[in-house]
């Protein structure tokens, strides 16, 4: 027996960049997060070749789930062509050899920052959301140890008080992104800084959603067919952003979440946040053979 028979040939990095021990730990933590929906599971967040706060948590989960047959889509606030999305997509291709796509309907693994695609995700797709701050109680309970006790006791009274004070002061709930939501009737989670428009998409969805915060070293999940209910009072309905009647400046389509782009002279231009979905509408209008997937919203209202 020689040393060469006991070792593997040298490689610049392991498949998927992360070592097998790191992947194994993340898989175990993810399974626990799926078993207890909405519960924040701590994990040993590894170093990856990007700065903390730019999606390291989501990237680690994606690298763990990566395989050569995967088809990956990466979006940054709805855009496929941002520097961050393009860089992560290029990195995943280099270390995993996975296929790439801009089309939501073709992807099997979707990593996103701050948005859920407009086209409805299927049971064979996994959504990975990057999370800068996973703790929904941080604004009302800065002591993280105390916040852990409140989660254990399901004591979310301070969150309800915060929402009530917003109604008293402003006449409506002012909470926008990261709207606190009750998962499976037990844990309140912060659903990433997605807009209120996207929160209903998590409710009883067909797909698995994994949320990961690399800087805070937390993973939590929303399994398929799980209840996700925004915290609202019985007599005050949950309201999403009112974009129903505003046309997209690129595609002319209405009824979807839009970005407001200030123009010279004080005017505003609105463009669909889901950039490739807008591109598909443009291509279809020009006669290209494009298939539009089913959507969560129709004419600005939830379709289900």
Image (cartoon, rainbow, N blue to C red):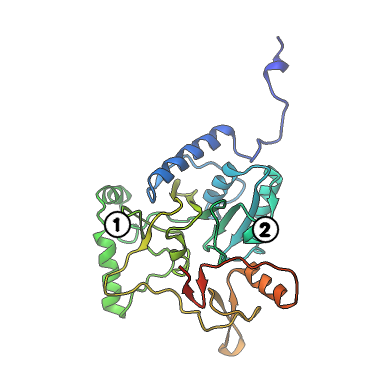
Q: Does 171 sit above or below residue 192?
A: below
Residue 1 coordinates in the image, percent (x, y) = 70, 9
Report the residue at 38% width, 70% height from top.
175
Report the residue at 36% width, 74% height from top.
174
Real-space CA distance between mark 1 and mark 2, rounded to the nearest whole angstrom: 37 Å
Q: Earlier in the sequence, mark 1 or mark 2?
A: 2
Q: Which mark is residue 86?
A: 2
Report the residue at 61% width, 87% height from top.
264
- Please state which of residues 9 and 111 is positioned toward the viewer in this rendering: 111
Q: Which mark is residue 275?
A: none
Residue 87 found in image quarter: bottom right
Instruction: Spot the residue most to the bottom.
Output: 265
Residue ID for mark 1: 141
Is 107 situated left or right of 161 in this image?
right
Disc 1, SS? loop
Neighbourhood count class around disc 1 (C-alpha, 10 Å): few under 14, some 14–19, many 20 upward: some
Q: Does 285 sit above or below residue 111?
A: below
Neighbourhood count class around disc 2 (C-alpha, 10 Å): few under 14, some 14–19, many 20 upward: some
- Please state which of residues 19 and 236 is positioned toward the viewer in this rendering: 236
Residue 9 coordinates in the image, percent (x, y) = 73, 26
- Please state which of residues 177 and 251 is positioned toward the viewer in this rendering: 251
Name the image quarter holding the C terminus: bottom left
Tell me, yes or no, whether the two marked residues, 1 and 2, touch with CB atoms within 8 Å: no
Residue 56 coordinates in the image, percent (x, y) = 55, 50
In this rendering, the label closer to the viewer, 1 or 2: 2
Residue 269 found in image quarter: bottom right
Residue 3 coordinates in the image, percent (x, y) = 70, 14
Res. 84 in view = no
Res. 13 in view = yes
Disc 2, SS? helix
Badge count: 2
């Amino acid at each position: 027996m020689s040393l060469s028979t006991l070792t593997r040939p040298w490689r610049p990095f392991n498949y998927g960049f992360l070592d097998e021990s790191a992947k194994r730990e993340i898989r175990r933590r993810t399974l626990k997060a799926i078993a207890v929906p909405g519960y924040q599971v701590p994990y040993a967040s590894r170093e990856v070749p990007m700065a903390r706060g730019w999606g390291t948590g989501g990237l680690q989960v994606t690298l763990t789930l990566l395989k050569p047959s995967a088809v990956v889509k990466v979006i940054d606030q709805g855009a496929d062509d941002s520097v961050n999305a393009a860089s992560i997509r290029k990195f995943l291709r280099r270390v995993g050899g996975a296929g790439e796509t801009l089309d939501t309907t073709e992807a099997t693994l979707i990593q996103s920052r701050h948005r859920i695609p407009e086209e409805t995700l299927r049971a064979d797709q996994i959504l990975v959301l990057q999370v800068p701050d996973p703790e929904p109680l941080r604004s009302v309970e800065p002591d993280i140890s105390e916040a852990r006790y409140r989660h254990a006791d399901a004591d979310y009274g301070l969150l309800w008080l915060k929402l009530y004070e917003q109604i008293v002061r402003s006449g409506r709930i002012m909470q926008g992104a990261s709207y606190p939501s009750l998962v499976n009737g037990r844990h309140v989670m912060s659903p990433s800084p997605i807009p209120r428009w996207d929160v209903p998409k998590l409710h009883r969805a067909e797909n698995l959603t994994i949320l990961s915060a690399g800087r805070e070293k937390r993973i939590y999940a929303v399994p398929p067919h799980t209840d996700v209910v925004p915290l609202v009072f019985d007599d005050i309905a949950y309201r999403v952003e009112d974009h129903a009647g505003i046309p997209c400046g690129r595609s002319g389509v209405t009824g979807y979440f839009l970005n407001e782009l200030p123009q010279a002279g004080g005017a505003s231009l609105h463009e669909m946040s889901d950039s490739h979905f807008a591109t598909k509408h443009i291509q279809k209008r020009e006669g290209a053979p494009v298939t539009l997937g089913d959507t969560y919203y129709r004419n600005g209202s939830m379709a289900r």
